[in-house]
């Protein structure tokens, strides 16, 4: 059915499967209980796929409400001063627009009339920009780090290649051993893997940066050059006596317009630079494969190359969608099984050569608000990803427990354990854990949230505190025997 020409997409296939199962159940066939279970499984998997798509496409996000709350006092002051100034500026708007027209028409730079309104708007916009762009708690920098730079982009584009044994990080004799292909194949695939890695990391490190005065961000595509003309445009758009809500919203919307231009530029680079570069690398791989003298056993690797080239092309098209302004659509309240199932699927897609054997014991049947879904998925992803990265095995066993917190001020406890490496230096790692704990206690983790790599625990605290606004939360992590344990207590206990 999956390969049928009569179905447009997977959704239509799944819908038809459900219809067939329902028809057979109505006919009271002997295997009705199996069919009902199949209907349930298809429905659940369809729901999970839908939510994965929603979450995976919401990479670009800014916590506007958090910014408004943080800047409320400052913006209120700017607003009151603005209202006072516009009362005595009857001809200013006309004079400013005339100068803008002359400067743009003749390519000159005649100074604008002296006034207090435009500098005020520039200062207000600059204050909002600091939080909108650079804040690791509320702004783009923190969300880009968590959703894109923190290994996700690289893993997304390389996972299928790794699984197929085309992308090799070290000596990998798979093709020699299984298909008796010339030893030259290892050298060819090592070059291919290096070229792919350089292309992906080059794109990420060069372009997915917010431009600052630092040298390594000069080619970044998140640029926010806020000129005097932009503040004049804001002045033109504001009503004579705007509401405070209109005043703060227009400042945020101006920054979103800049962001959308930046995102368009990134999509352009993916389409016109990254995709052609990847296509060229595959072309080179095909040419080199044909230089192998013994061609008797090359059919398998040729098929794999064709298949992986198609998958990577599709993933690069999906990557373009990461760089669009998105808003979390309305998500119904959910039980905790949903984010667990979603995260398992995401991990499966990202870590092609590893999989998790998850023992999830969810004792809580409470429903959580839909807006918490992405936060829970992000937290579980960090925990599962961390377990896999520090594992000796291709199959990582993870135990997850959600129950009532044994701490009286919290409602829930999330308890996650995984096996540690045999040769792990627990003493050294315990020292690192103490340092992380101290930084969390003293709230000295903001800068680390915005950087790639490093510990994910700072990002978990950021997600709980600022994205999910869990004011009542506690996180701890420690070694116990041959296990690493993470405890997260959250939610205010109901009296």
Image: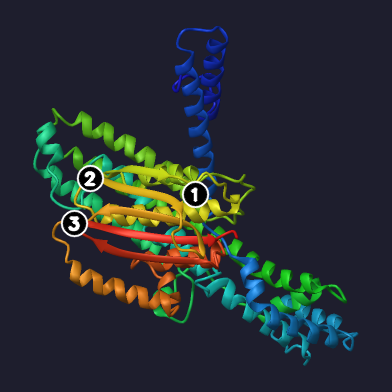
**Residue at coordinates 74% horizontally, 85% vertically from top-left?**
77
Residue 355 shows up from this direction: yes
Q: Which residue is mark 2?
A: 394
Instruction: For marks 3 and 1, give the CA distance.
Output: 31 Å
The picture quadrant where one finds residue 102 is bottom right
Percent x, y of residue 330 = 64, 47
Packing grade of label 1 (10 A; few <14, some 14-19, many >=20) is some
If the image is split into quadrants, where does the C terminus sit?
bottom right
The picture quadrant where one finds residue 283 is top left
**Residue at coordinates 37% horizontally, 47% vertically from top-left?**
347
- In the image: residue 263, left or right of residue 424: right
Mark number, residue 56? 1
Instruction: For marks 1 and 2, give the CA distance.
Output: 25 Å
- Counting residues from the start of the chain, the first of labels 3 and 2 encountered is 2
Q: Secondary structure at mark 3?
A: loop
Above or below: residue 189 compared with residue 323: above
């Amino acid at each position: 059915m999956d390969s049928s020409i009569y179905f447009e997409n997977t959704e239509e296939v799944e819908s038809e499967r459900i219809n067939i199962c329902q028809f057979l159940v109505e006919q009271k066939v002997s295997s009705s209980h199996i069919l009902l279970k199949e209907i349930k499984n298809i429905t659940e998997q369809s729901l999970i796929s839908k939510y994965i798509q929603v979450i995976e496409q919401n990479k670009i996000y800014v916590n506007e409400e958090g910014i408004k709350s943080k800047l409320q006092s400052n913006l209120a002051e700017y607003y009151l001063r603005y209202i006072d100034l516009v009362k005595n500026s009857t001809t200013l708007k006309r004079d400013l627009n005339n100068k803008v027209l002359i400067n743009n028409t003749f390519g000159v730079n005649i100074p604008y009339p002296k006034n207090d309104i435009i500098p005020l708007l520039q200062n207000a916009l600059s204050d909002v920009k600091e939080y909108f762009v650079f804040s690791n708690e509320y702004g783009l920098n923190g969300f880009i780090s968590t959703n894109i730079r923190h290994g996700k982009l690289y893993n997304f584009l390389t996972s299928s290649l790794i699984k197929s044994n085309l992308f090799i990080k070290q000596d990998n004799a798979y093709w020699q051993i299984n298909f008796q292909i010339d030893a030259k194949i290892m050298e060819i695939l090592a070059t291919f893997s290096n070229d792919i890695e350089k292309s992906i990391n080059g794109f990420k490190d060069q372009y997915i940066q917010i431009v600052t005065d630092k040298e390594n961000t000069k080619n970044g595509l998140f640029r926010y050059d806020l000129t005097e003309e932009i503040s004049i445009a804001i002045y033109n758009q504001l009503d004579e006596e705007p509401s405070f809500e209109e005043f703060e919203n227009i400042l945020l919307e101006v920054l979103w317009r800049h962001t959308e231009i930046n995102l368009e530029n990134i999509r352009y680079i993916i389409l016109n630079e990254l995709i052609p570069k990847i296509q060229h690398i595959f072309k080179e791989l095909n040419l080199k494969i044909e230089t192998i003298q013994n061609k008797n056993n090359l059919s398998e690797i040729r098929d794999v190359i064709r298949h992986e080239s198609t998958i990577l092309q599709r993933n690069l098209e999906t990557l373009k969608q990461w760089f669009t302004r998105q808003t979390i659509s309305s998500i119904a309240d959910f039980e905790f099984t949903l984010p667990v199932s979603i995260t398992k699927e995401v991990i499966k897609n990202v870590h092609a050569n590893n999989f998790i054997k998850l023992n999830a014991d969810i004792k809580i049947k409470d429903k959580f608000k839909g807006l918490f879904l992405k936060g829970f998925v992000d937290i579980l992803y960090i925990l599962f990803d961390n377990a896999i990265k520090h594992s000796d095995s291709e199959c990582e066993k993870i135990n997850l427990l959600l129950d009532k917190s044994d701490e009286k001020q919290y409602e829930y406890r999330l308890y996650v354990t995984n096996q540690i490496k045999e040769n792990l230096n627990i003493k050294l790692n315990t020292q690192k854990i103490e340092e992380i704990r101290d930084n969390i206690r003293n709230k000295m983790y903001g800068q680390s949230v915005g950087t790639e790599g490093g510990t994910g625990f700072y990002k978990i605290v950021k997600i709980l505190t600022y994205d999910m606004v869990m004011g009542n939360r506690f996180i701890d992590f420690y070694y116990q025997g041959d296990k690493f344990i993470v405890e997260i207590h959250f939610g205010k206990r109901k009296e």
